Image (spheres, helix red, strand yellow):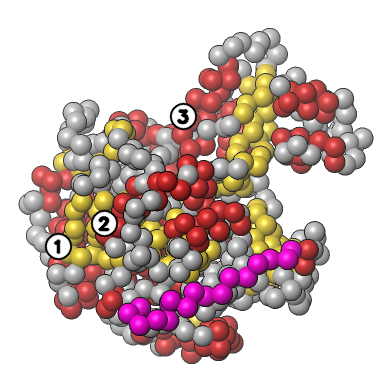
Amino acid sequence: MTASDQADPVYPVPERLFKEGVPKPHIASMDEYKKLWEESVNEPEKFFGRLGNELLSWAKPFTQVKSGSFEEGDVAWFLDGEINASFNCVDRHALAYPDRVAIIHEGDEPGNVAKITYRQLLQEVSRLANVLLSLDVRKGDNVCIYMPMIPEAVYAMLACTRIGALHSVVFAGFSSDSLRDRIIDCNAHVVLTADEGRRGGKNIATKRIVDAAVKDSPCVDHVLVCRRTGSEVPWTAPRDKWWHEETVKARPYCPPVSVNAEDPMFLLYTSGSTGTPKGVMHTTAGYLLGAAASMKYVFDYHSEAGDVHACMADIGWITGHTYIVYGPLLNGATTVLFESTPTYPDPSRFWQVVQKHKITQLYTAPTAIRALRRLGNKWLEGYDLSSLRIIASVGEPINPEAWEWYNEQVGKNRCAVVDTYWQTETGSHILTPLPCVVPAKPGSATFPFFGIKPAILDPVTGKELEGNDVTGVLAISQPWPSMARTVYNNHYRYMDTYLNPYKGFYFTGDGASRDKDGYYWIRGRVDDVINVSGHRLSTAEIESALIHHDSVAEAAVVGGQDDLTGQCIHAFCTLKPNVDANEGLEKELTLQVRKVIGPFATPKRIYIVGDLPKTRSGKIMRRILRKIVNGESDSLGDISTLADPSVVQSLIDKVKQ
Ligand code: WT7
């Protein structure tokens, strides 16, 4: 397929965004965007030097903006500057406007709302930072956070960065096995958690999961437990401590510890093409600048106009880090922390929340948009969504039908629809329209953000494909401030995954086209990563979970297309000799995956098969399985190189059953 096969509709920027009563856009014309973008990639020192001073407050100013290269893998920004993340997010706003609301917590039960001002935020973060110090956490130490979507989770992140410790937030949907692996990998001495979580009207046994993980994590000395539901939980003294009992004793001010711009700020584990998750490491000033700048320009955020920003992600993913916590707070924003689901207690929840808090920017995932669209427009009826200006999407390609529904039903054709493409590793948006500037094409993430120079490469030769109307793999040609600097304890793996595949480029792992108008279209992963409901999973990781089951000899996992979740998991397993496929086995294998990874990795289908398609040297041909599950069995290509070509027909029959 060439990029020009598409005759794509173009949606101009809604005029209403320039009308009286609407804040004047930070960037108001295509010319202005182009001029700034040119400067950002041609004179990055000048551009980011200016932006760094404009958007961040420094304990010691930097004199050098940028150093290092992709070739050497030693990228650094603002090298001799010193800064504190928590000070930038909290103190400077608490001083300027202490009574402004920093966080609106929309609890799981509608009506259960808490508002935390910047003054309170400074006190809560300080108390907790002092507790961490009393637990012997020091600059450079790793702290694991496994928490539900409550304000204390945000305090936890900011308390770590206040004292120069790194947080490693683990999404609270991960199983105890996954949590244990992440705790051990970063050698965390302290885990912050809650008694239980609460989501969609159900209680989640958060502390019990932590107990099971910590039992096998000898590095953990302390578990600090926040009371969310008040249910009885198992207790291990003196390891376990109640959050409220410790913080009440602590002083509500803690001086921020200045760190070097390149000191590590946090780890976030993510899946790659091989089995074990990688601890992606972000450093301080560059990450903060990417978060602050993209929040300001991509969401056209205006604190003076009383904007209320709602990112519906979980803080356990990078989207939550950058656009619930750091991006908004760096801009002195009011950020919504949403504990529930889009359908609890009914599918009008998002719209209730938009109306109640007069949300101006709404940020969610295509999966949620598709699910709500399918449930019907009646759930939006009667809700006042007129506060919305920018409605945005993230995590996976958004199909044009979902885009149009979002634009019409939610945006009422008067909001900018912003499709943001980025990754855990990029720290902040890299391809995205600026809302008041770029005419949209549904399904395209449009143009690069400041500092991003994209390149489409021929996947085989690695040659850059110049000009428009080209398709290949997406790479970035030069360093930008918020890119990840390494994989924790494994710089070799960092180089091998991102910087060595195409020398001189950062490799995203995604296929992409640049169409005749220069718009970028993401075509999905070209490696063994699959994306289910915006959750990133490695096929190798799921296979490894399955192989750990006593009955399984081999496993092959591929992504199938799914109307709702984007992709879904299809798992093929062969059994060990003398093991019979009993009735409960598929269920057991499903549970096995849920136990090793977490419920969000549940396979849609598990096929117990006699054999897998293999080459004569024994390599499993996942390409063939991928085609079979996606109904492309008539275009399997040459299967004569298979050790046993007859396997294919039996697999086709099995999948059809
Ligand atoms: C992968 C990164 C940081 C966003 C949350 C996911 C896919 C992300 C888009 C988009 C098409 C997208 C890519 C990317 N992706 N946003 N707007 N259009 N694909 O972060 O878990 O690190 O996953 O998500 O495949 O590589 P992540």
Q: Nearer the viewer, residue 365 or 214?
A: 365
Which residue is tagged 3?
Answer: 595
Q: Main secondary structure of the magenta part?
A: loop
Which residue is tagged 2?
Answer: 356
Which residue shows up at 68% across the image and 75% down it? Answer: 518
N-term-proximal mark, 3 vs 1: 1
Binning the other alpha carbons within 10 Å of mark 3 as few (below 14), some (14 to 19) or many (20 upward) gives some
Residue range in magenta is 6-23
Which residue is tagged 1?
Answer: 120
- Quadrant position of the C terminus in the picture: top right
Badge 2 element? helix
Compared across the picture, whether 276 is left or right of 499 comes to left
- Quadrant position of the N terminus in the picture: bottom right
Where in the figure is residue 200, as x and y percent of width and height? 33, 38
N-term-proximal mark, 2 vs 1: 1
Compared across the picture, whether 129 is left or right of 490 comes to left
C-alpha distance separating marks 2 and 1: 22 Å
Which residue shows up at 59% across the image and 12% down it? Answer: 583
Q: Nearer the viewer, residue 171 or 305?
A: 305
Q: Amino acid at mark 3?
A: Lys
N-term-proximal mark, 2 vs 3: 2
